[in-house]
Amino acid sequence: MRFGLDEDQSSLQAAVRQLFERHAPLDETRSAFNMSSHQGTWERMTDMGLQGLTLPDEVGGSDATLLELGVALQEAGRVLLPGPFLASAGLATSVLGAGDTRTTRAWTERLAAGQLIGTACMDATGVTVQGTGDRVVLSGGTGPVLSGDVADVLVLVSTHESDVRLVVVDLAAPGVESRVTTGVDPSRGFAEFTFDRAEASVLDSDPAAVDRALGAAALCVAAEQVGAAEAVLAMTVDYAQTRHQFGRPIGSFQAVKHRCADMFVDVERARSAVMAATHDLVAETGSAAEPYMAAGTASRSFGRVARSAIQVHGAIGFTWEHNAPRFLKRALSTAAVVAAFAPATRAVRSLETASVGDRKVVQEAVG
Amino acid sequence: MDLKYPPASEEFRTEIRGFLDEHLPDSWTGVGALDPDALNEFIPQWRSVLAENGLLAPHWPEKHGGRGLSVVEQSILIEEFVRRGAPHQPAANDPFGINLLGPTLLAWGTPEQQDYFLPRTLSGEIRWAQGYSEPEAGSDLFGLRTRAERTETGWRVNGQKIWQTAGVTANWIFMLVRTDPELERGRGISFLLLPLDQEGVEVRGITNMAGQVEFSEVFFTDAIASHDHLVGALNGGARVALTLLGFERGASGIAASLRNRIELDRIWGLATSQGRADDPRIRERLAECLADVHAQRSVAVKIMTMAANGEDPGALSSVVKLIASTYRQSATELALDLVGNEVNDLDGGEPQEMLQPQSLGFDADSSVAWLSDFLNARAISIYGGSSEIQRNTIAEQILGLPRDKRS
């Protein structure tokens, strides 16, 4: 038994960390907020096989698990990596994983090759899906979708009563309108989509696979949040040790010291929960609710840690010039993305739920 | 990352489940379901069954009545007992004798001390209390003042110890005493064993704010401990005490999270009886509790695997205690919110547990018990190293921040 990365995972972690330190360090990505200036890093990530980490070998993926993808996302979180890595390699790829490989191949091959950017909308309650079978027509619209501004293809999780369908829509297709939104986190774009009888494909999928895929998607966001929380904690502890007032480091005052300790507890709680839930999803030993419990934990922990970081940094932490507020904005943005995993991650559902597939809300307590 | 239990451990889990099936009554729904009379009858019987099967002190070596279980096996044992609502340390003094004093004697005691005390601890003839804290030495343990002077007849002890859990039912105490007043703080203290049933000893129960006499204080006026009952080196008590604190790391965390999980089912039951099961605010809080319990379990699994791999979890134990104390306070607050105005019209059976959640089978509707749980939860952030001390430990030992200045 071992709770932690194995040798291969540690090597992956080191390689990805080095890639981001060289080509997307936190201080430099402050201004590199759009895809074109990001292109070199994206290509390097593709060359390293990061886009298709969890995709099968036969479509050009690395055939790795969510554990490996989680490692890469954690590293991306540490540097607040701009761009669509989470949306594409994380959300879209995970959800597509629930579909039949022969159908999804049309997209997964190009995703793995870094030629296609995907994203997923986890709350498609505003979208009407008309038709049965594998070609449908969409009307209505979505809320803001992560990296919708640069995505080529959108995966929608459509839930209608007990009917769950995975719908894939080519965003260049007729009847699709997009509106790029302005959100709290300048490092990543969002866009809102409206459909006017837009044609889309439905993926063949079974409820158990959909459950796992949605859980995986939630854990992708959570992994990124954990990495970011770790980075802002380290930044904060460093500041507490070097900033002097009243003739001593501010970290020698208990109020500051204790706040840092609480931040550490939050980080430890989040990373343990996310790693355990990721392991259990891969090993197929976890409950349907487990990924959402871990995702909720990560989201709340990252939010608290980001807020505490501002406090410890004092006035300078409040300036846009400093890096600390970037973590807070990322926390706010991702917390909302996680919350939009409706109905899956909403507080109500994490209370002893059965699968998304049968939509049972709460079981009676064990007597 | 591999959380699959080894096959031998899974066999052990099956064995323990079989043991519980065999020795618990068919109608068993958890010790929590027993009324006080049935409980008083059950406990000594059950304790004997455990002792006979080497399961009362399973981590002790076989030659001393244990089974020499590994950390993983200990964890499985406690988890399975909790899952069935069967006590694994039935008497109130058991944790002190079995988890603290026993392993201390195994590490530091002479063969004579082991041969004398270990079997009597197992049989229950000797019931231990822990004598560390004093009125003037709480967080600052090494400021302790209880003196032991060497005389011809033994160590003459004068002073006072306070906050012994289950002190009223104890007949022996293991204590830290100052044996050399010239040496400062941790340097002049020794670890001594002393019988409480003697003239120079007075034990007084202390009533806690929940109205229970769960702990005590002890006054020593020329009390005598045998020369043979010094454990470890003279003036080497600090080392003995610090290693004692390191025992049992890793084996009990998963079961502790399961206790919290079982309690959540009761809180859900309470919410249902109070007609609050559909209240979105209650459901949101319950969901956060569920997520917290999941996180507790995850950290516990991490620590267990570290201990199993011979890695010292170190100050991670401070993280566990902080999370646990915050959680128990949140969960019991939620319960009391659900109890509502019944807090002014208390009803229901008395609690069985004061230091832990009630066990499987306990009535979900007893406001008397929920109030006790809430009040007792306030102490968790104080005993066993206060939350302030735990935060210092995390900040200093994990994050490398500067230590507090002392005057």
Image (tube, rainbow, N blue to C red):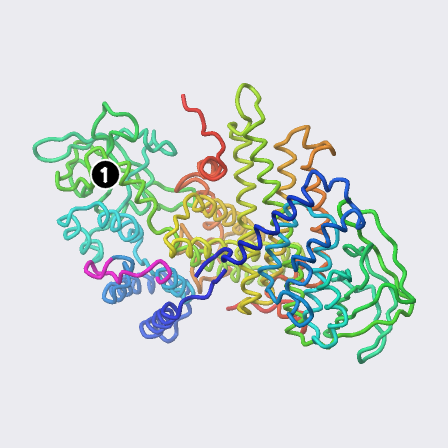
- Give the answer, above or below, for where A139 lies relative to B232: below
Q: Quadrant of residue A319?
A: top right
A12 to the left or right of B70 = right
Residue for point 77% across, 66% down: A156
Q: Is residue B72 magenta?
A: yes
Query: Chain letter of disc 1?
Result: B
A14 to the left or right of A318 = left
Report the span colored magenta. B61-73
Residue nearer the viewer, B256 or B400: B400
Q: Which image quarter holds the N terminus of chain A?
A: bottom left
Residue for point 70% across, 73% down: A99
Query: In what element is the residue under mark 1?
Result: strand
Estimate the x, y position of residue A207 in percent, counting from the top left: 67, 74
In the rendered structure, which amino acid carries the disc numbered 1? Phe
- The residue at which mark 1 appears reads as B191
Residue nearer the viewer, A334 or A358: A334
Residue B34 at least partly seen = no
Residue for point 40% across, 65% down: B80
Residue nearer the viewer, A327 or A302: A327
Q: Is residue B298 magenta?
A: no
